[in-house]
Each structure stands twice: as structure tokens, then as C-alpha cells.
Image: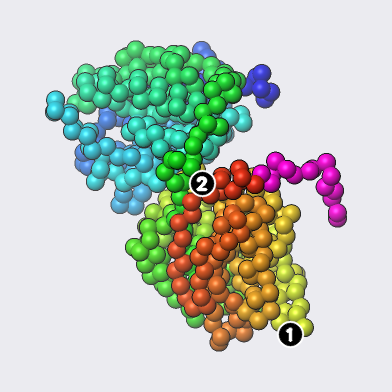
Amino acid sequence: MTSSEKKLRVCLLQFAAQENVAKSMIHLEELVEKAVSQHQPHIIALPECFATEYNCEVSFLESVAETIKDGQICRTLSTLSKKFGVYIVGGSIAERDGDKFYNTATVWNRNGELIARHRKVHLCDIHYENGVDIVEVNRFSPGNDMTTFEVNGIKCGVAICYDGFFEEFIKMYTKAGCEVLFVPAAYERISVGPRSWEIVHRARASGNQFYVAAISPARDEKHKYVNYGYSMVVDPDGNIQAKAGIAEEILFYEMDLNIVHNFRKELPLFASRRLDVYNKMELRVCLLQFASQENVAKSMIHLKEMVERAVNQHQPHVIALSENFATECITDVPFLESVAETIEDGQICRTFSTLSKKFGVYIVGGSIVERDGDKMYNTSTVWNPNGELIARHRKVHLCDIHYENGVDIVEVNRFSPGNDMTTFEVNGIKCGVAICYDGFFEEFIKMYAKAGCEVLFIPAAYERISIGPRSWEIVHRARASENQFYVAAISSARDEKHNYVIYGHSMVVDPNGDIQAKAGIAEEILFYEMDLNVVHTVRKELPLFASRRLDVYKKQD
């Protein structure tokens, strides 16, 4: 899609819920078919709690809650998106996950596949003098992150209702590159609707210079909670370009994304921001310098204890582990065969998923021996606070190192190599993960900086006699300094009983190459709060990337 063709055709369905979910699904198909026939949209968006009336009573939630993918509403959304070849932002549903409920928006691509899920982050506890109460706390559980997806190369976000009141949260979508934000919402018609519907969404659009599509249910006076209505599309200048009434309606609008670029060029808000003045952009990290136990099962029990302690003591955003943290570092094929597991189904990965969800934290899972068919990989996994796998990095550079003192570190012909870098986001902060020997190769690590990373996690297992004393500090300090980002290098604890003795000294290096936090050799939780303003300041003061001479550099293979 060229810049002149950068359009997004959207239909907002101001939906009237029927007397039960089954009838709402029948009506939904009729409305989607009508929208597609009349407008040929790229994307259709629904409101918050669209399939039922808005009701947060626990007994009601119990009766309508469903699991993602398998529930009646999700199956319908999948079927309709595939049948009509359209993206669908599925408003929100009451999601059941174990013994918890979430107010959850799902996004489906034109193949009927679930591509994004947003759990409402900010839960209402609102009490107006006129007697209207909007209470979600202690009924729903909150989500812990923003949610983005792409439609035809256009980056979009989804937030739910009350999320839109919090400008710090919505700013994260802009930092992540969004040009459109969908906000399924259920504002009440007497209090919060007249007071806040227009101003909140216009403010979010103007302040972030992107389109906001705010989608309300139709108004139904028979319901105890009466929705406001007035679904609308707001342009990046904060002007309402399309607006529904209060009854059921299909609101169509064709967004011109060139307007986003023009507004941002004419009024360069982001270039004028004073990050040195605003509150710190921070990332709280705990590096677990872990002491593996006698077997994987006992290591998992110990991991739970250590993660719980890290969360209680430091409230981190991210917990990171070391290379091969759960076992002794051995690369003999029989040992690898005995501990290898598949991603997601293996014991270690199941534990990561459980712990990240239980404690509401991101986990960079060091590395494991991954089995994939007849191959094995040295693989790092990353898990979000919902317990979902969001990234997987297979070690790209495999060791074939032989020191004169007799220490051999051999991975070639035992592991298969990965073939790419790996990135993920935490609260709008772009992070990368590489494994141990990957960090020696500056051309490879430069790829992370080019991709916009501000933090690089490197689970590693340097040996204590040779490679550790020689290279641990200088390699990680060099990578941080030349790429002007934070490097978190995570080692296991030293255990002299092991055949391969780990160096230890996990550390955090800042974008100037200075060590800001460093562990000893024993098991330890190393905590550090990264100030991402430092990344921006260092890059502004010493503009290495702007000074690069790509016309001079030559490939030297």
C-alpha cells in the first residue's frame, strides 16, 4: 500500500443486544453481512459487552462468561471474520479464565484467526450522586498491558472504555506506533456519557495525533444500565468526522492515514516532548542469578519461591533468568536428550506460563533445551502477565570454543542454530533477547538497535576460569555503549560441584557502558530500575546512529 493509498475503511456496529447470547449472534451475522454489503470495510468494530446488557453482578457474569476461542461469541466472531473476509474487533466479552473473569476484547483477522486479545486494564469503581454505580473491581480481574495489531500494514490498538480516561496509558499506543485506536465502550447515558464521551475521545485523538474509533452499544431504555450511544470516529486533530445517534446503526468511515502523518509533521508534538522534565520512563527488572537444583522438578519448585520473593520485594515489570538455568550446563547429547522439552507443553514452559500469570509479571525465561522434531535448540522464551508466550529466541551463534586450559564449550552439531533476532514489548518499551555467545557479534546485536530496542536481555552461561574473567564485562559493556541501550546480562549462580562452573556476576549495564548493578557469585536477586530517559538522552547527546557512514561500510564476509 503506497502512502497515497493508505486508507482504512471501518464500520462501527452500534449493536442492540438481543434477549440472549444465541439470538445476539444471529443478529450479529445479519448486521455484519449488511455492513459488508453496503460498505466493503477492512475492519468491523463492536462495543463493550455487545452481546448482552452491561451487568457486572457476579451471578450474571457467571451465566454469560466464556473462554476465549471456544466460547459461543468467539466462535461466531471467528466464523464471521472468515466468511466475510474482514477484520473484526470483537467489542468485549466476559472472559472466564480459571476462577477469574476479565472484560476482554478480541481481534480476528480475515482468516478467522485470533490475532490479539485485550483485557481491560482500568476497572471502574464509580459512584455518582444520582445513584448510578459502575463497579467492576472485585468482579473482573484487570489486564496488565496495552494491545496492538496490524491491518494492511496500519498499526492499530484496542483499549476498553475506562482505559481511555488515562492519558498515560493511551500514550503507550502512540509510542508503539499506532495510527488508529479502537475503544469499545459502554458509557452510561445520564452521568458519564454526557459528561465525558466526546471530550475524552477527542482529547485522546488530539493528544496522540491518531484516529480514535469509539464504539457504543445502542441505547435500550428497558435495560437497568442504559447506554449512551453516539459511536463516533475522531480524527487526529480531535474533530468528530462521523457520529451515530442512539439507536442501532452501522457507522461507516474511511480513514485517510496520510492525515495522521500530515498532522504529526505540521504540529510535531513528539519532537517537542521534554522527556527530561516528565516523570521517568522506567522498567523495573529482577535478574535471578539462579542455583539449579538436582533435577528440573525441584528447580521449578525453587523457581516459584524465588519469583514470589522477587515480586514481593521489588514489584518488577520483568523477571529474567539465565541460560540453561534449570539444569547444570552440559552439552553432551545424552544429557540434552534427557532434559529437552517442547515449547509450551514442557514442564519448564508450563511453569513459566503459570508464574507469569500468577504474579502478573513478564518473564524472560533464560534458556531451555528445546526439542522440535529431531532437532534441539538452545531457546529463550518470553511470557507476558497473562501467561502467554509472546517471543521465542533460538540461539543464533553456537559455540565451538577450545581453550588451552582444557575448557571446551561445544554446541555445534548438538544444537541447531536459530536464524533471527527476537524482540518484544513491555509497557511500550521495546526489548530484545539474545543468548550468551550471540552477544559477541556486534553486527548481530546492532540489528536490535536498528529495530528500536532500548533494552537487551542476554541470558548467558560464561565459564568461570577462561571466558568469564576475560570477556563477561567487556562484551556486555561494549554492546551497551555502542548501541546506546541497557544490557541485562543474566548468569546462573556459581556451583563448584558442577563439571562446568559458571562465572556468575549478573549485571545491568547502562547506555553509556557503565555497570549500574552487579551480583556476586552466589544465588541472588539483582534488582534495578532502568530509566529509559537515559537512553534518549545519551542518543541525543552522542548521535551515533545519525553519524553512521553506510556509504563507506562494506560487507566483509
The percent coordinates of residue 535 (x first, y second) are 56, 48
Question: Where's the N terminus, which quadrant?
Answer: top right
Q: Mark 1 points at which residue?
A: 406
As drawn, the label of residue 344 is: none
Question: Where's the C terminus, which quadrant?
Answer: bottom right
Residue pictured at 41% horizontal, 38% vertical: 169
Q: Which of 515 and 122 is in front in this view?
A: 515
- Protein image colouring: rainbow
In the structure shown, which secondary structural element does the residue marked by tag 2 occupy? helix
The percent coordinates of residue 486 (x first, y second) are 57, 55
Residue pictured at 45% horizontal, 56% vertical: 529
Amino acid bearing label 2: Asn
Label total for image: 2
Q: Is the magenta stretch mostly helix, strand or loop?
A: loop
Amino acid bearing label 1: Gly
Q: Name the residue under label 2.
A: 533
Query: Where does the magenta region start and end?
Result: 543-557
Above or below 416: residue 277: above
Q: Does the magenta stretch include residue 551?
A: yes
The percent coordinates of residue 260 (x first, y second) are 55, 23
Picture quadrant of residue 467: bottom right
Labels 2 and 1: the sequence-earlier one: 1
